[in-house]
Every structure is written in C-alpha cells, then in structure tokens.
Image (cartoon, grey):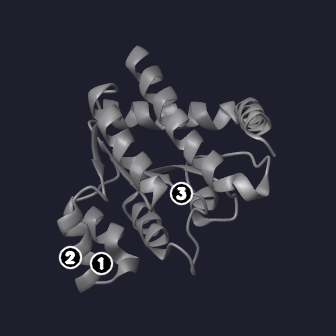
Amino acid sequence: MDKHNFIDLYLKRSAQIAESCSRENLEKMADVLLITRESQGRVFFLGIGGGAASASHATNDFNKIANISTFCLTDNVALFSALANDEGWDSVFKRQLEMHHFTAKDCLFIFSVGGGTQTVSKNLVQAIEYAKVVGAKILGVVGRNTGVTAQMADACLVVPTVEESMITPYTEDFQLLVNHLLVNLLKQL
C-alpha cells in the first residue's frame, strides 16, 4: 500500500470508529465525572505503555480544564518502580490507591487496549477489584470487551474494531479523543 492509500484508509477508519462509538457510554462517563467533581472526589488515571501516556495527559487536562483533582498512578516513577520491585508488578496500582486513601467518592479511570485479565495486566484487575471493594466508580477506554475493565466498569467505551491488526493504535487514538471530549464537556457544565 502506498502512502496516499494508507493515510486515506487510516483516516476513513478513524471516522468510522467515531461514528460507531457509544454515545450512551460517553454520557455515563460524563455523569460519573460530574458526580465525582461535585462530591470533591478525585480521579485516578492508570494505564500501561501508551495507556500510561494517555493517563498522564488526561491527569493534566482534568486538573487544568475540568477542575477535578486527579492523579496518574504511573507518573511517580520512583514510587512506581519501588513498588514493582519490592512488592510486585501485580499490586503496583492497588498499593498506590491504598496509599492515597482511595474512597467511594473517588473514580478509577483506565486506559488499556486489553482491559486486564487474570493472565495479562493483572495490576489493572487488582486495582479494579479494590475500587469495587471501596465502592468507587470505574471508567475505562479499552480496545476489547473481554477484559475486566469492560466487564466491571460503571461506564466503559470499548473502541469499535474496524481492523484487527490496528486495535492498539486506534484504541490509543480514542483514549485521547475521549479525554479531550470529556474535559471540554465538563468545562461547559
């Protein structure tokens, strides 16, 4: 495929995904975030790889634009690496939620392609299970409906698949799109 055709196809697929996104789930996400802001709760963002970068970006935007107190659980590299080394990779997010005294007023927001399973990204699963125990709301933007995030979240956008080999880039594209959509919506409300 030449450059022109690749670019054209990528953009057409992006538009197709945007048209297929669940407006209902996006509205539910906005509702959860409004309640979190009104109750002076906090939003804890997390992800791995590209999802961690999206989480860091969202942390900035939600603080600055949407006026919600936020934390990114991968931004403190010293703490993140110490916990992974000393206590294990699987509990790295759950332990930080415990340290931050995560409560029912707070929200966990996950950016992930797979969404976490018992064999891949168990750290996401432990964070989700802990959020359920404390009664916090869970949001997510993921690429697959088979992970724990999609199954247990209060609202989760599963990015529609238009090309199996491109799930990761499109999911990560839409993590940022959803971030910008929500913070700018909340700014208006």
User: Picture quarter containing residue 189?
Assistant: top left
Name the residue rendered at 27%, 55% in the picture: 75
Residue 36 got which mark? none
Q: Please, is residue 113 above or below residue 36 in the view? A: below
Q: Residues within 10 Å of mark 3 (few under 14, many from 20)?
A: many
Query: Are the residues at dot 2 and dot 1 in contact (C-beta closer than 8 Å)?
Result: yes
Q: Position of residue 143 (x, y in %)?
A: 65, 54
What residue is pinned by disc 1? 84
Assign a secondary structure to mark 3: loop
Q: Position of residue 39 (x, y in %)?
A: 30, 35
Q: Please, is residue 76 above or below residue 186 in the view? A: below
Q: Report the Cα–Cα distance between label 2 and label 1.
A: 5 Å
User: Picture quarter containing residue 83?
Assistant: bottom left
Three-letter amino acid code at the position of disc 3: Ser
Three-letter amino acid code at the position of disc 1: Ala
Name the residue rendered at 43%, 72% in the picture: 123
Q: Position of residue 183 (x, y in %)?
A: 42, 28
Q: Position of residue 132 (x, y in %)?
A: 45, 62
Q: Please state if 60 lies on the left or on the right of 22 as rendered.
A: left
Name the residue rendered at 40%, 78% in the picture: 90
What residue is pinned by disc 2? 82
Which sits earlier in the primary sequence, circle 1 or circle 3?
Answer: 1
Residue 112 got which mark? 3
Residue 75 visible from this viewpoint: yes
Q: Front-most of 82 and 122?
A: 82
Q: Report the Cα–Cα distance between label 1 and label 3.
A: 19 Å
